Amino acid sequence: MTDHQTNKNILTAGPYWTWGVPLFLLACMAVILWNDTNLDVFFVINGFSRVTGEKLWALLTFFSDGLVTVVILLPWIRKKPRIIWAVLMAALIYTVFGQAIKYCAQVPRPPKILAPEHFHLIGPGWTSNSFPSGHACMVFILAGVFFFTTPKIWVRPVLLVFASLVAMSRIVVGVHWPLDVLAGAVIGWISIWISLKLSYFTRWAWTAWRPKIIGALLLAGCVLLFFLNYTGYDHVFTEQRIIAVVFFIIGSFEYLKLYRINLQ
C-alpha cells in the first residue's frame, strides 16, 4: 500500500474540476426541463445505433453494470484498496438514496410508453423505475474514483469522455431518458466524492486483513461474470467472458501478493 493511500486526503482534483462536472450536468438538465426536450433529445441519441450498429453500444452499456464496475478494480486490490472501498461505499450511497428516488418518482422507461416502431431497443426492454439511471451512476462512480485521485491532468478528460459515452449508451439501447442519465451521473459523481472523503475515517475497512475479504469477493464476481449472462445483452457475452478471465488472472496475481507480503 502506498503512502499516498494512507494520507487523510487523497483527492488531487481541484474545486474547478470537482464541481465543474456536476454543475455542467445540472445545467444540461435545466436546459432540457426549460425547453421540454427530454423526448426530442432521447430520439436523437437513441438513433445513433442505426449508424454505428448495436454491438458498440451494448458493449459500452455493459461497462456500467454494477458488478462489472467493481470487478475491473480488482488489479488495484493490493496497491489501492482504499479506492475500491470508496467505490463500494459510493455504490451503497446510491443503493440507499438512488433507489429511494426511483421508488418515489416512479418514472416509466421508454419501452413502457413508446411504441416499438418509434425507437430502437437493444437488449431487455425494462419498463419501470427509470429515474435516475443506476448504470450512469455506477460508471461515473468508476470514472470519478480515478478522476479525483490521479495526479495526471490529461487522464481526467479521457475518463469523462469514457463515462459520458457509457452513460449515453443507456439512451441508445432505449431504456433511459436523458434526464435519467444526467441525474444518475450527478448522483454517482457526488457519491464517490463523499466516499473518498469518508474513506480515511473508515480505514478499518480497507487496512490489515480486510482487503483479502474484498479481493475474494471480487474474484468471485469474476467467476459470476464468466458463467452468468445476467445482463441480457447477448451481443457481448463473449466479451463479458474475456473481461472476466482477464481481470481474474491479473487480479489473482495482485491478490496473492497480499499473502506474500504477510509472510515476509
Image (tube, rainbow, N blue to C red):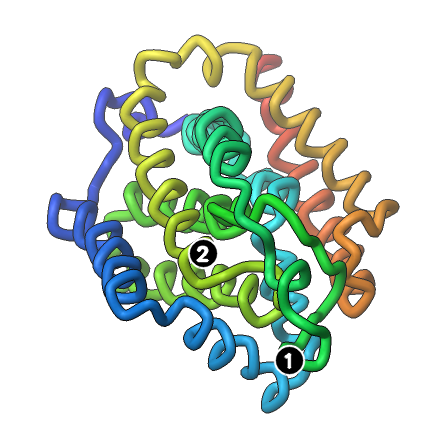
Q: CA–CA distance between discs 1 and 2? A: 20 Å
* Quarter in which the C terminus is drawn: top right
- SS at mark 2? helix
Residue at the spot 23% in from the left edge and 36% down from the top edge: 11
Residue at the spot 49% in from the left edge and 24% down from the top edge: 96
Residue 72, visible in the rendered structure? no
Residue where numbered disc 2 is placed? 181
Q: Is residue 257 above or below residue 145?
A: above
Residue 220 on image: x %, y %: 76, 32
Residue 7, visible in the rendered structure? yes
* Quarter in which the N terminus is drawn: top left
Residue 194 on image: x %, y %: 30, 29
Residue where numbered disc 1 is placed? 118
Residue at the spot 43% in from the left edge and 47% down from the top edge: 184
Q: Would residue 152 be found to the left or right of residue 98 on screen? A: left
Residue 211 on image: x %, y %: 56, 20
Q: Amino acid at mark 1?
A: His
Q: Mark 1, residues whose alpha carbon is within 10 Å: few (<14), some, or many (≥20)?
A: few
Which residue is farthest bottom?
51
Depth check: give the residue in front, 187 or 138: 187
Q: Amino acid at mark 2?
A: Val
